[in-house]
Image (cartoon, grey):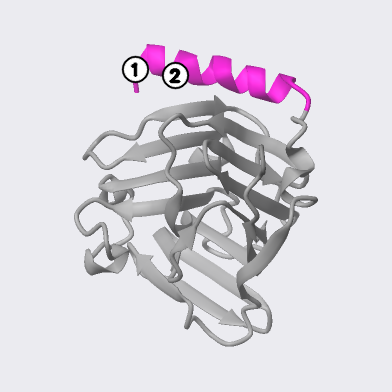
């Protein structure tokens, strides 16, 4: 990553974190919305596709999606999402002495399309290593990545070796065994990623990605995820 690119990310991040939450903060809730997808994780992985680099386990039962992996893992929601929408879930980084309990990398792809098979994300085979996702056009949030030292937003552009950095923080980070209540807003040019009521990433994209697939992404870690829900937002009237 170039010094210029990193500097831009840091400056933008400082501005975003230093500013009060925008008026549209609660925009996702008061605005009319309709539930279009959910999984309570009581009936297996029928709504999901897993891509594992070095094995591990991904299970869904008793209300919990459990991801316990020694390497890279991407867990895709099969349903393609069309904006405007709000997606919410709760995830906890497990630290209980297990071999993968590293407390790192609560990451997401959203509005993802693979340029090699733009009409069907799953027509292209991927094996869980991060570089295999360079051909996506997508937003990517990396919360508490790199051994829980960085929190970054990227905008993938579908080119090998190119992962443009939009925002680059050194906090907030993960806290072991504490829930992260995540909200993702995809509303035209408005791109937001919230955690526990705090706007972590707020970005206005002049050429937004407005539809595609959502995924949980992590590497060498152990997470428990619950109750993912997606709401369609009603268009705002001028």
Q: Quick check: marks 2 and 1 in contact, CB under 8 Å? A: yes
The x, y position of residue 151, in whole percent, is: 56, 35
Is most of the magenta stretch helix, strand or loop? helix
- The vertical placement of 188 against 212, above or below, is above
- Residue density around tag 1, few if under 14, some if 14–19, many if 20 or more, within 10 Å: few
Q: Which residues are magenta?
A: 1-20
Occupied quadrant, residue 150:
top right
Q: Residue at x 21, y 40 (%)?
A: 160
- The vertical placement of 181 against 200, above or below, is below
The x, y position of residue 156, in whole percent, is: 36, 39
Image side of residue 218 versus residue 96, left or right = left
Q: Residue at x 52, y 34 (%)?
A: 152
Q: Secondary structure at mark 1?
A: loop
Q: Specify the label residue 2 is tagged with.
A: 1
- Residue density around tag 2, few if under 14, some if 14–19, many if 20 or more, within 10 Å: some
Q: Which residue is mark 2?
A: 6
Residue 71 in the magenta stretch? The answer is no
The x, y position of residue 191, in whole percent, is: 56, 39
Query: Is residue 166 among what the camera can see?
Result: yes
């Amino acid at each position: 990553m170039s010094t210029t690119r990193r500097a831009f990310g840091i400056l933008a991040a400082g501005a975003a974190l230093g500013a009060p939450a925008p008026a549209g903060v609660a925009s996702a809730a008061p605005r009319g919305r309709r539930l279009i997808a959910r999984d309570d994780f009581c009936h297996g992985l029928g709504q999901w596709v897993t891509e594992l680099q070095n094995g591990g386990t991904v299970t869904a039962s008793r209300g919990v999606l459990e991801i316990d992996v020694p390497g890279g893992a991407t867990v895709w929601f099969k349903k393609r999402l069309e904006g405007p929408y709000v997606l919410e879930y709760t995830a906890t980084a497990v630290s209980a002495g297990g071999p993968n309990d590293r407390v790192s990398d609560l990451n997401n792809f959203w509005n993802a399309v693979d340029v090699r098979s733009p009409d069907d994300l799953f027509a292209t085979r991927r094996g869980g290593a991060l570089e295999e996702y360079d051909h996506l056009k997508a937003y990517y949030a990396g919360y508490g990545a790199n051994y829980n030292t960085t929190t970054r937003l990227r905008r993938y552009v579908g080119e090998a070796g190119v992962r443009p950095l939009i925002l680059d923080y050194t906090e907030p980070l993960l806290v072991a065994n504490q829930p992260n209540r995540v909200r993702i807003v995809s509303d035209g040019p408005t791109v937001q990623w919230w955690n526990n009521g705090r706007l972590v990433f707020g970005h206005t994209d002049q050429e937004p990605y407005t539809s595609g697939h959502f995924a949980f992404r992590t590497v060498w870690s152990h997470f428990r995820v619950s109750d993912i829900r997606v709401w369609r937002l009603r268009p705002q009237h001028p």
